Image (cartoon, rainbow, N blue to C red):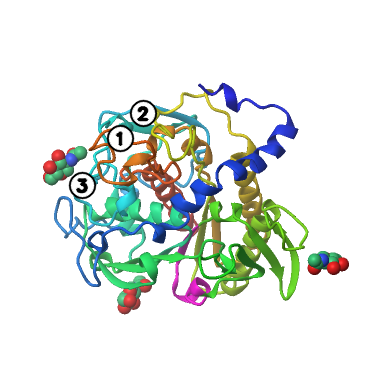
Amino acid sequence: MAKDHHQPHSFTKKLLPWTLYTILPIAIFRCYFYPLQFPHSSTDELSLNTPIIITSSSSSSPSFTSSSLSKEGEIRADEPPCDYTNGNWVHDKIGPLYNGTTCGTIKEGQNCITHGRPDFDYLYWRWKPKECKLPRFDPNTFLELLRNKHLAFVGDSMARNQLESLLCILSTVSAPNLVYRNGEDNKFRKWNFASHNFNISVYWSPFLVDGVEKSNTGPNYNKLYLDRIDEKWGADLDRIDMTVLSVGHWFLHPAVYFDGDSVLGCHACDGLNHTEIGFYDALRKALKTTLKTMTERRGSSDKVLDMFVTTFSPAHFEGEWDKAGACSKTKPYKEGEKVLEGMDAEMRNLEVEEVDLAKENAKQFKGMRLETLDVTKLSLMRPDGHPGPYMYPNPFANGIKERVQNDCVHWCLPGPVDTWNQILLEIIKRWEGQSRKRE
Ligand SMILES: *[C@@H]1O[C@H](CO)[C@@H](O)[C@H](O)[C@H]1NC(C)=O
Ligand SMILES: *[C@@H]1O[C@H](CO)[C@@H](O)[C@H](O)[C@H]1NC(C)=O
Ligand SMILES: *[C@@H]1O[C@H](CO)[C@@H](O)[C@H](O)[C@H]1NC(C)=O
C-alpha cells in the first residue's frame, strides 16, 4: 500500500516536490485554493449575528473554576511535556466530540456526513501518543482557560478547517455568536462566547506575510513580500491573546518573492525572467518575518501572547484528482505503514526549526510563549479523513460519473482535525500549570 512512498534517496526527496507540482497544480488550483471557484449556496454561511445552532446541552456551562481544575488534576505542571508527534491511531468506540449534521459552522465542502459519505468508521479513531495519554477534549476546560481572551486562527484554509473543528466542539457546551464577518467566502470572522467573554476569530492570510494572491483578473502567480507581515491580521495583534498560525499549501503555487522593492527570485514562474529559488526558502523567510515581528511587537508587553504554529498538513491524492477513488481509503495507516518524507517532511521540519529559533529568541521576553502543533505525522496517517468526492453533496446519486472532483487536502468535520485541537488544549493546560506554579 505504502510501497510507492519508500524513496530512500535524497535525490528522490528533492525531486518529489517538483513532480508534485506537475501533477497537482490543476487539482490544487481548482480544488482547494480557490474556494470561490466553487459557487456554493449561501445558505451554508451564517448571517451576521445569527446564533450558531447548538448540538446539545445547555448554554450555561457548569462553572469550572481554576481551582477546581487543578483539584481534579486536570493541569499537571510537573510531568515532562508529552511528545504528541509519534504514536498510533487506535480504534475508539466513543466517537466524535460533536455531531457534524447539526453543528452550523462547517464549510459545506467538509461536511462529509450531510454530503452522504456512506462510511462512518473514520469517526472512531483516537490518537495514542507513544509515551503519554491524549485526553478527550473537555470544552468546559478550554473555555475556562480562555475566559476573557481572544484566540485568532491566522492562515489559509487549513486554519479555517481547524477553527471550525474547535467551534463545533465548543458549541456543544456554549453558544457562540458571530459578531463580525467580512470578505469573500467569509474569510474574516469573529465569534463571541458570551458565557466566558471569549472571542475566537479567523483571518485569511495564506502567506502570513504581505502578499497579492493570483487571480483570474491579475497575474496568475502570487506576489509575496517576505520582509513584512500581512497587516490584515497584524494590525489586530494588540487585541489578540493567542494565535494559531497555519500556512503551507499556498507556497506551492507559482510566485514571485520580494524583499522590499527587490525581487529575490521566484518559483514555477516560466517566462518571468527571475531566478527560480523554490518555495522552501520562501516559507522559511515568511515564518521568520512573522515570528520575529510578533516577538518585537509583543515580547515586552505585559499581556502575554501565546503563539502556535500548526505544521504542514499532508494531502492524500493517490489517484487522479478528478476520478473516483482519488483518496478512497477508509482506515488510518498503521504505525510504520507510512513514512513521513519528501515535501511533507521538509515543510514540517522547516516549520519546527523556525519555531524553535523563535522560542530561543523569545526566552529573553516574558510576554511570549510559543509552541509547534506538530500534526504532520498524525495527519499523514489519516488518508481516510478527507472529503474526497463528498466535498459535494451526494456525488454518486446518479451513478459514478466519468469525472468527479475530489478534496484530498482538507478534512471532514468531525474528523482528524479534532485531534489537532485536543493537542492544542493539552499544551494550553500545561502552560497554565507552569504559570500557576511560578505564582
Ligand atoms: C446527529 O444528530 C441528528 C439530530 O439529533 C441525528 O438525526 C443524527 O442521526 C445524528 N448523526 C450522527 C452521525 O450521530
Ligand atoms: C470580544 O469581542 C467583543 C465584540 O467585538 C468585544 O466587545 C470584547 O471586548 C471582546 N473581548 C475580548 C476578551 O477580546
Ligand atoms: C532577463 O534578465 C537578464 C539579467 O537581468 C537581462 O540581461 C535580460 O535582458 C532579461 N531578459 C528579458 C527578456 O527581459
Local SS, label 2:
loop
Q: Please state which amino acid type lies under the numbered disc 3.
A: Thr
Q: Is residue 266 above or below residue 401?
A: below
Front-lying residue, 238 or 211:
211
Q: CA distance from mark 3 to mark 2?
A: 20 Å
Q: Looking at the image, in which quadrant does ligand 3 appear?
A: bottom right
Q: Does the numbered disc 3 mark a residue whose Cβ is under 8 Å from ligand 1?
A: yes
Tell me whether the residue at label 3 lies in contact with that at label 1, contact meaning CB atoms closer than 8 angstroms: no
Q: Residue at x 26, y 33 (%)?
A: 399
Residue mark closest to the camera, 1 vs 2: 2
Q: CA distance from mark 1 to mark 2?
A: 10 Å
Q: Which mark is residue 123?
A: 1
Q: Which mark is residue 416?
A: none
Taking the image as shown, residue 25 lies to the left or right of residue 328, namely: right
- Where residue 408 appears, as percent x and y from the top left, is 44, 41
Q: Residue furthest front?
A: 402
Would you name the residue on which mark 3 appears?
A: 101
How dense is the environment of label 3, judged by Cα within 10 Å: few (below 14), some, or many (20 and up)?
some
Q: Please state which amino acid type lies under the numbered disc 1.
A: Leu
Instruction: Evaluate whether residue 149 shows in this view.
Output: no
Front-lying residue, 117 or 254:
254
Q: Please state which amino acid type lies under the numbered disc 2.
A: Thr
Magenta segment boundaries in residue numbering: 232-245
Q: Is residue 3 above or below residue 316?
A: above
